[in-house]
Amino acid sequence: MPVAQLLESLRTVVEPARLLTQKAQITPFESDALTAFRVRPEAVVLAESQEEVIETVRLCHREKVPFVARGSGTSLSGGSLPVEGGIVIALNRLNRVLHLDPDRRIAVVEPGVINNHVTKAAAQHGLFYAPDPSSQSVCSIGGNLAFNSGGAHCLKHGMTSNHVLGLKVVLPDGEVVTLGGESTEPVGPDWAGMFCGSEGLFGIALEVTLRLMPEAEATHTVLAGYESTQTAGDAVAQIVASGLLPVAMEIMDALAIEAAEASVKPNYPKGVPALLIVELEGERDVVDADAARLREVIEASGARDVSVTERAQDRALIWKGRKSAFSAVGWLAPDYIVQDGVVPRTRLGEALGEIDRMSTEAGIRVANVFHAGDGNLHPLILFDGREDEALHKAETLAGEILRLCVRLGGSITGEHGVGVEKRSYLPIMFAEDDMALMLRLRAAVDPEELANRGKMLEPSWSPEPRVGDEAAGPGTSPSAVPPAGAAV
Amino acid sequence: MSVATGGVEALQEAVRQGPLVLPHGAGTKPALSTPPDGVIALDVSGLTGITEYDPAELTFTALAGTPVAQVSAALEEHGQYLPIDAPFAAAGATLGGVVAAGTSGPNAFRHGGVRDFLVGVRFIDGTGKLITGGGKVVKNAAGFDLPKLMIGSAGRLGVLVQLSFKVFPRPEATMTVSVDLGSLEAALDVLATLGRGPIDLDAADLEPPGRLWLRLGGAREILADRVARLEALLVTPGERIEDDAEFWRDAAELAWVPPDSRLVKVGLTARHAAGLESVLARVGAQARYSLGANVAWVAWPGDRPLDDLDAGLRGLEIAGMVLTGPPDRILIGSSGGGAFATRVRAAIDPHSRFLEV
């Protein structure tokens, strides 16, 4: 039994208190924020140093035991779901900011560092770390890197991979390599960029060099109500056409607004069918000039209930409302599925109209929250897992929405990654030859498929890790409330 | 050396036939694109044209042989631009060549370089298959990030066929301030201070020992006030260049590089600049620093062995890519990748149709 041998060897690597094998200790690791999926690993290693991670990976490779790296477990695509017969390597304790260089605007961090702890460390120098997934108060940099996380401010700042300059990683056979460096300009193939978003299939990041950005001098946030998500979407197109470059443009529909109001009371305009949030940031003079232009565009776009703020506390509340929208939907229905499709921005209105039609046809309520500036939709499909077939129907609708996104020229995931949730949809976006190359890449880096097996790509020779039979039963259906802060 | 031309299928066939192939666009970075003996040049300069561009989408897709200048003109008509400011655009550089070389010009300082704007690729892998990676939308986390892999791959991990980029609104007006701080150290100090805001610079170049070229772009009516604010921050009096287009065009063309020297792109940060200067001083080589000293453009004397620069870069633990001169070697210094690079290469080019990176 390779696992038994592995555990015996691991006892020489980590102290017994950090090698979890008892059911009660392991249960919290069975699932991540995609709670419909649940697998019990054989053991969990609570690593405290890079050496322990490297040694654990080497032993897994020697014994051919699959492993899953896990940070805070906030993946919405099941990215850190354990593998049956495998172990989990928990990285939360590798949480040091190793080096922060304000002059070069870089931070070197361990993978377990919480996203917004990077900004907390950089703030004293007037710097911040730009990618801001909604779960930023709990999610870890390692997970952000593995799934190329986004956030609300990608429109101007880009995704995680744009902010990762260098990496030290342990490959699935235990070999340690350095990719990229400290410069914003890679020389030769962008290996660090290629590693980002590889969903753990290429190994585990041990050290991450991040680019920091200067904090904006001024931030100007506009809330505008609209008659429909389509007219709000049209306003986004008009803002783009005006030549403005907001740092964020978000839309929430009536259901999502209702949910946010019911939970964190962000004081959004009352009774509007759709809400647009637009944020400008930059130099004081530039923001003032842009704000005047933005006001003209918004006034001409049929908005009502327009409000503007530059106060930090108002802004924090606005974003708290937006970022808690996923968990807040738990107030509206016992269960829901979060989707993460992307469409070309000019086809947002069309996509929303179609989702609305599909939702009516299926008799399933869908709340919409989305990064309109990026064309990144987050339909929240509401259902009650206690009802017969409800999960299945919701999953079918979710699948139809993803197909729609691909048909319109977009993507099945903007920022949550493929994980286990969407891997059967990857082939609708990519042709057979593209898929074959991805499988070849995986096989070349990790021939035994030990690292995060079953994520992004179908496992070629292991049983399905999904415990589908239990998924509809009580207690294991998609939870209404994911772990604190888990969201986009 | 023979040249395979024609459409995508002919290129695929040429890759399948081998034995060794190397794509070639406008040839503005000849060290990367000149085929050594026995290597078949794949001429992609016929693959031109913008295939999709909707200004409201802030993205475009074009064939890899499309000249950057053609794209810039099309974008400018709609008040947009590709902020990567590709070097050698005026000399005819193609989109494919820019991605393959991974070269970003001085005005990439504001919003980022090739890796920040390339969103999708179509390329021929080493088995002759046409592969799509990434997408045409600005946000996309599906599948391995093959667009990133193509950046800086120098035609040695795939033959680029089509590229999709995001674009941004073009600054309405620009102005440049030039200031001489007297020493490298003083100039780097000012760059570090400016890098922490609050002013968003479009470009920040350094000509050793201590001259900075700082560019501001944006709305015309507030530009002069912003420039005045920048000047006040600088303390040392500078000169304004109000009509700065020609200056920055020359900077992006690397017009200062002597014709008999080899141009090397070196990725670094400000902490490496003094060390690099001493390596260069030994042979009288020159460099200019761009992107807030994240890249050094080194003009290495053609009659000096590259080994000396290679050793110097290794000592500093930084890497360089040789862009001009004979195609003898392209990567020098400490480039990472290790076993990861070897394995990715084996997957993408199992029959070794491409040259070593």
Image: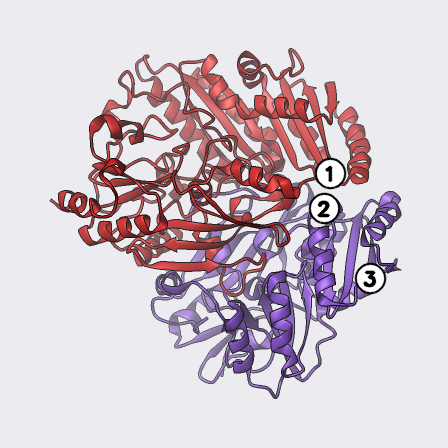
Q: Colour of chain B?
A: purple
Relative height, residue B132 to residue A316 (above, below): below
On residue B197, which mark appears? 2
The answer, for residue A134, to whether it is visible in the render is: yes
- At x 43% / y 52%, what residue is drawn? A195
Q: CA distance from mark 1 to mark 2?
A: 8 Å
Q: Is residue A449 left or right of residue B195?
A: left
**What amino acid type should be assigned to the residue bearing mark 3?**
Ser
Closer to the camera in the image, B319 or B246: B319
Q: Is residue B205 visible?
A: no
Query: In the shown orientation, is residue B256 left or right of residue A186?
Result: right
- x 54%, y 61%: residue: A186
| Residue B229 location (% of width, % of height) | 84, 47
Hue used for the chain lettered A:
red
- Mark 3: secondary structure: strand
Neighbor class of circle 2 (other Cα within 10 Å; few <14, some 14-19, many 20+) is some
Query: Disc 2 to disc 3, how far (Cα)?
Result: 18 Å
